Image (cartoon, helix red, strand yellow):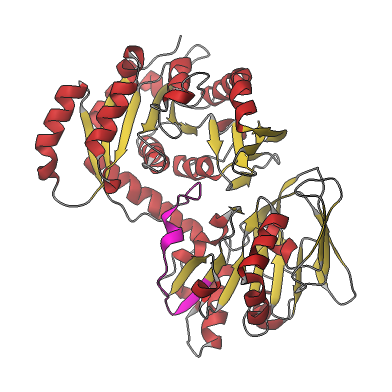
């Protein structure tokens, strides 16, 4: 393939040279924008360019803490990994973390601005345009190419006013747009053509290519439909991308992982409460062939797992009440006498004796915990945000072989946890264990080193199954292969000459 950008554009940028931009928008949520953005980041990196992802506004409960202690969406972290650069909060200047059905915690430049209702935020968000511009300009100082991800659909006409994440952003940075439709859900021609029809003339002019995503079967059966789509839409189809079994991180609760119910040799059950967050903590287990990771929201789905995981929560007290009402709390407490139970962040807080909320951070008052760890949590208004690393302290019970293993991760929580009795194994109140029950504030604790492999090997040995130490691939190496696989697939099924042509024509005032 001929590289269309010039050598000066690639390596000789001056203070007046601006990054080339391209934007991925979708006909709906979960059309594949995040993966396509990551794949293009990887391709441009492989072709020798400095590339960075950008999403002005992200709504997700999966978040990450940067080296500077700032909070951003996990999807942009995944895309930064694909681009081969460290995650920076300027890649995601606005993060919305839903607190209920009508409101969210608003995070700007990695720090909490406050809680807002959807109506209040809709009226307020245009005031954040200077913050978006500031973040984008910072990325330009580094990148030759910026790959922008939109959110939802640009055809949500009720949201067009004050838009800062789809066509409003494309206009702001003068970006050409690739529009993606999801054929796996059906009606892809109506998705794409209907979206084009609902755009203004100026917005339609920005759409330079259409992508049909998640296709299964013989692409030749689409050709007559594509001809009509191009005729009526006056936009070329830039690619037909097959359904890919790529194991990378999703950004929200639409993830297909929640639908997986098959049980394998080693069965891990993750409690899926209504406000589940940072479930990406468990992705490392999904790349292990003999391990099933099932997300369960009822006692009937729990069955007889080998390990129960309690993930993070955006509302610990509310989700603990939900567990109590559904009977999952009692089920987990019974299983804790027989199998390991491991809580992270909000899940860790639930496992304790009490949770108090004197400042009304969540629901106010106090709530009895599950009583499986002799610790007590007090919720506070100030959010703890920091990266952390070290070695696990001396553990007892099923996971005693984890003792002394190195970990690396990050903390993100609004609460302080303390021991309430002697004999509790603690490390700076960040982690605790008692019998078969374990808890920690450290997100990503399973991702580095041999911790996940040791957990699975321990569970296997308890069932009389022997697993060799070398059977589990390092998670970072695994993800790198997934990014390369994603890029290889997109190179095959996208017209990269056309996409490079869009970049060549892109400019900023």
Residue placed most toward the observer, 386 or 179:
179
Q: Nearer the viewer, residue 428 or 111?
A: 111
Against 29, residue 216 (above or below) is below
Q: Quadrant of the N terminus?
A: top left
Q: Give the prevailing secondary structure in the magenta stretch.
A: loop
Residue sticking out furthest to the top: 509
Mark count: 0
Where residue 5 sits in the image (x, y, percent)?
33, 22
Judged left or right of residue 362, residue 182 is: left
293, 248: nearer the viewer: 293
Query: Image point 35% across, 12% down: which residue?
Result: 202
Q: Tell me: 126 left or right of 358.
A: left
Q: Is residue 227 left or right of residue 89?
A: left
Mark yes or no: residue 156 visible: yes
Q: Using the rendered view, name the quadrant where residue 166 is placed.
A: top left
Percent position (x, y) of residue 45? 40, 37
Q: Is residue 2 visible?
A: no
Up/down of 131 relative to 383, above or below? above
Residue lying furthest front: 325
The residue range painted magenta reads 249-268
Looking at the rendering, which quadrant does residue 128 occupy?
top right
Residue 253 picture location, percent across and down: 50, 50
**Is 426 covered by the magenta stretch?**
no
């Amino acid at each position: 393939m001929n590289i269309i950008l010039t050598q000066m554009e690639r390596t000789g940028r001056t203070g007046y040279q601006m990054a080339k931009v391209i934007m991925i928008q979708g006909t709906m949520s979960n059309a594949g924008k995040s993966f396509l953005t990551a794949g293009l980041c990887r391709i441009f990196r492989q072709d020798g360019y400095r590339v960075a992802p950008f999403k002005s506004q992200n709504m997700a409960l999966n978040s990450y803490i940067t080296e500077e202690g700032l909070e951003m969406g996990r999807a942009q972290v995944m895309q930064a990994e694909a681009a081969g650069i460290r995650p920076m909060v300027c890649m995601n200047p606005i993060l919305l973390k839903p607190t209920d059905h009508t409101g969210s915690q608003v995070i700007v430049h990695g720090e909490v601005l406050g809680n807002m209702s959807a109506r209040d935020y809709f009226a307020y968000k245009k005031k954040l345009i200077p913050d978006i511009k500031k973040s984008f300009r910072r990325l330009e100082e580094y990148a030759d190419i910026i790959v922008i991800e939109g959110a939802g659909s640009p055809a949500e006409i009720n949201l067009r006013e004050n838009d800062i994440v789809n066509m409003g952003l494309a206009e702001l940075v003068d970006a050409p747009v690739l529009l993606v439709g999801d054929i796996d859900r059906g009606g892809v021609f109506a998705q794409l053509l209907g979206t084009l029809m609902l755009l203004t003339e100026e917005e339609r002019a920005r759409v330079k290519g259409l992508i049909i995503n998640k296709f299964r079967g013989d692409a030749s059966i689409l050709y007559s439909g594509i001809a009509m789509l191009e005729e009526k839409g006056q936009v070329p189809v830039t690619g037909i991308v097959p359904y890919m079994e790529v194991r990378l991180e999703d950004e929200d609760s639409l993830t297909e992982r929640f639908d997986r119910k098959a049980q394998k040799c080693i069965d891990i059950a993750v409690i899926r409460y209504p406000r589940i967050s940072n479930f990406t903590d468990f992705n490392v287990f999904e790349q292990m062939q003999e391990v099933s990771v099932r997300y369960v929201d009822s006692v009937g789905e729990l069955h007889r797992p080998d390990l129960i995981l309690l993930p993070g929560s955006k509302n610990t007290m509310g989700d603990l009440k939900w567990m109590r009402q559904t009977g999952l709390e009692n089920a987990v407490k019974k299983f804790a006498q027989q199998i390991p139970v491991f809580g992270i962040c909000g899940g860790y807080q639930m496992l304790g004796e009490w949770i108090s909320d004197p400042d009304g951070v969540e629901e106010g008052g106090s709530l009895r915990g599950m009583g499986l760890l002799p610790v007590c949590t007090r919720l506070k208004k100030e959010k703890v945000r920091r990266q952390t690393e070290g070695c696990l302290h001396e553990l007892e019970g099923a996971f005693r072989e984890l003792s002394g293993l190195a970990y690396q991760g990050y903390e993100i929580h609004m609460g302080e946890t303390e021991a309430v009795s002697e004999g509790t194994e603690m490390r700076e109140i960040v982690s605790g264990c008692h019998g078969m029950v374990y808890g920690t504030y450290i997100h990503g604790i399973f991702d580095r080193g041999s911790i996940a492999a040791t957990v699975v090997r321990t569970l296997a040995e308890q069932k009389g199954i022997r697993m060799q130490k070398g059977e589990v691939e390092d998670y970072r190496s695994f993800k790198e292969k997934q990014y390369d696989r994603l890029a290889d697939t997109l190179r095959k099924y996208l017209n990269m000459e056309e996409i490079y042509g869009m970049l060549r024509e892109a400019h900023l005032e």
